[in-house]
Image (cartoon, grey):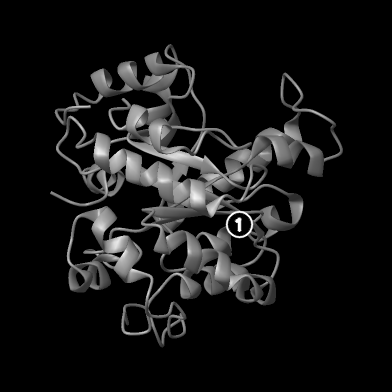
Amino acid sequence: MRVNKAVQLLEQDQPIYYVGGHTGADLSYQAGKDMAHTPADYINIGMEHGVFDLAGLEQFIQGLVDGGPTNSGHRTPAVIVEMPVDGSSADVIRANGWQFRQVLARGVHGILLCHAENPEAVKAFVEVCRYPFQTQGVGSYLEVGRRGSAGQSSAAPIWGVSVQEYLDKADPWPLNPEGELLLGLKIENQRALQNAEMTTQVPGIAFAEWGPGDMSMSFGYRSLPNPQPPEMVEARNRIFSACKSAGIAFLEGSSPDRVAQSIDEGVRIMSAGGAAEVAKAGRSYTKRTMPI
């Protein structure tokens, strides 16, 4: 059994379902205990617009551990943090490398980079999340990893592994087939859209989404128009196609009556927040056997 429930399911080509919004969450210890048996496969922690609360994140994840294991036998649900730093350039990512180190040291299972605008920024994102001794992809496109030593001692107990095992496993999947970290992108403005085919091809990325709220603002709308205008539909389809070409998972919302169609189209990550029926219907459609 893998440490990361979400990776284990994606490896089986099973869709996964998450809970958690983009504007913060209760990061108390008790909230973690209460969510230890969430029916979701992973929990999104929204620090892009929510408080960048490292102490709260640490308490929340410890609550998940103490309230676990999950019904599937995993120590915790996977935890993916939506970061506040933008992927506007490699320099911005490297200048904010401390954010990634701090979050990873809390024992999270993945990171979502917002406004992933160009391949150089995404390349830097992967590198700041990797240890320098992990060499898959290095030399062909990636440079040596920049994550330093020390955080493994706090993250390993959360994962329930030794420090040495953590060092081996804390690497992006599927670049490293044995890796347990999920790194994702939000391609959510017109600058990012123009580079979608290149950013999704960066080794180490496992999934991407198109961020319709921010994308609509990028096109000049104050809120998400309904129905979506042609330029929005075209943006979504372009990013979805880029994900398919890159062989990475596409994240998009769905509904109970549409989830089967979403799965058939190739969507592999969907929200279960406020709509648990989406996950229920999707799991039934794919005949998932892993307990929730």
Q: How many marks?
A: 1
Dot 1, how many residues are within 10 Å of its Cα: few (below 14), some (14-19), or many (20+)?
many
Residue in view at x 28 percent, y 28 percent: 37
Residue in view at x 27 percent, y 49 percent: 4
- The vertical placement of 143 against 99, above or below, is below
User: What x and y, as percent, mark residue 112?
Assistant: 52, 52
Residue in view at x 49 percent, y 23 percent: 254
Q: Is residue 204 visible to us here?
A: yes
- The vertical placement of 52 against 263, above or below, is below
Which residue bears the numbered disc 1?
A: 196
User: What x and y, as percent, mark residue 186?
Assistant: 59, 49
User: What x and y, as percent, mark residue 205?
Assistant: 44, 60
Residue in front for this viewpoint, 257 or 71: 71
Q: Is residue 175 visible to us here?
A: no
**Splitting the image into 4 quarters, where does residue 228 fall?**
top right
| Relative to 292, 203 lies left or right | right
- The vertical placement of 84 against 224, above or below, is below
**Splitting the image into 4 quarters, where does residue 217 fall?**
top right
Q: What residue type is disc 1 on?
A: Ala
| Relative to 84, 276 lies left or right | left
- Image quadrant holding the C terminus, namely top left
Mark 1, secondary structure of its residue: helix
Instruction: In the displayed orientation, state which residue is furthest to the bottom.
Output: 139
Residue in view at x 30 percent, y 69 percent: 153
Residue in front for this viewpoint, 209 or 102: 102
User: What x and y, as percent, mark residue 110?
Assistant: 41, 54
